[in-house]
Amino acid sequence: MKALLIVAHGSRRQTSNEEVRQITAQVEKLAGDDFDWVGSGFLELAGPSIPQGIQQFIDAGATEVVVLPYFLSAGRHVAEDIPAQIEQVQVLNPQVIITQTSYLGSANGVGDLLLGLACEA
Amino acid sequence: MKALLIVAHGSRRQTSNEEVRQITAQVEKLAGDDFDWVGSGFLELAGPSIPQGIQQFIDAGATEVVVLPYFLSAGRHVAEDIPAQIEQVQVLNPQVIITQTSYLGSANGVGDLLLGLACEA
């Protein structure tokens, strides 16, 4: 049983957090059988936290959790903070496979998306 | 003559600014005849600034400049700060058409990109 947690920074602006939840709902629809659960987690300023989000999936029966950073650049949050928060849950649940994917900004296809937006203008 | 300026927040971390310049170079390659120039600009902490970036295109002969926010959410930067900086250049160059597109996070296709990253894991 496989889960996907999309993790964002979190914002004081609730509509920004809501945007993350909306894109998460969109990915959940697209995912079909690829993931049994899809949810969001936040580094700060919103909930659930990343450890809470992962633990909720494990409590529901997930044996594998994929953590995807919804970030544009490979800064400290992506390189250090998210791995450290994953590790907190990993040590409590050594039987679960928890992996972190590359961040959104690194995805092939971002260039095409940008050009698409630019050409709609 | 049409130009595209991809605008990011800017970071103290130079590699993050470099990532924006790299994605800009990628869009430039993809753009073909859609844009005569493609460049990047930054709201703060890196250069060129947004007004400088737009003005450089105008000085080179651009009659139309499209400004694309490389941001994930529709916060104050996208809704207020970028339009205010565009306006500074627009009043000095009323003959040039300067438009701001929707921001990256709003693009159709972000969900597909995320699912692609998640499934590579």
Image (spheres, coloured by chain):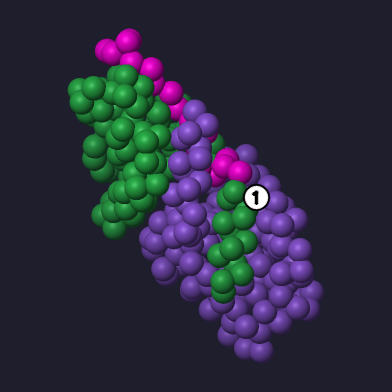
Chain colours: A green, B purple
At 58% across and 59% down in the image, what residue appears? A114
In reply to whether residue A25 is colored magenta, the answer given is: no
Residue A72: % across, % down: 51, 45
Determine the image quadrant of residue A81. top left
Q: From this viewpoint, which residue is outermost toward the right?
A: B60
For the magenta stretch, what is the residue range?
A: A91-108
Report the front residue among A79 and A120: A120
Q: Nearer the viewer, residue B12 or B80?
A: B80
Residue B22 rendering spot, x and y as whole percentages: 68, 47
Residue B74, percent across and down?
Answer: 39, 61
Q: Quadrant of the N terminus of chain B?
A: bottom right
Circle 1 residue: B23
Residue positioned most to the front: A33
Tell me which corner region of the image, top left, top right, bottom left or bottom right, holds residue A86.
top left
Q: Residue at x 51, y 46 (%)?
A: B113
Q: Is residue B30 left or right of residue B43?
A: right
Q: Is residue B33 left or right of residue B96?
A: right
Q: Residue at position x 45%, y 56% from top?
A: B105
In the figure, residue A117 lies in which quadrant?
bottom right
Instruction: Give the percent coordinates (x, y) of residue A69.
Output: 44, 37
Taking A12 as reference, is B78 above or below it? below
The answer to whether residue B11 is seen in the rendering is: yes
Q: Is residue A67 above or below residue A24?
A: above
* Type of amino acid under label 1: Ile
Chain bearing mark 1: B
Query: In the rendered view, would you say A102 is above or below B114?
Result: above
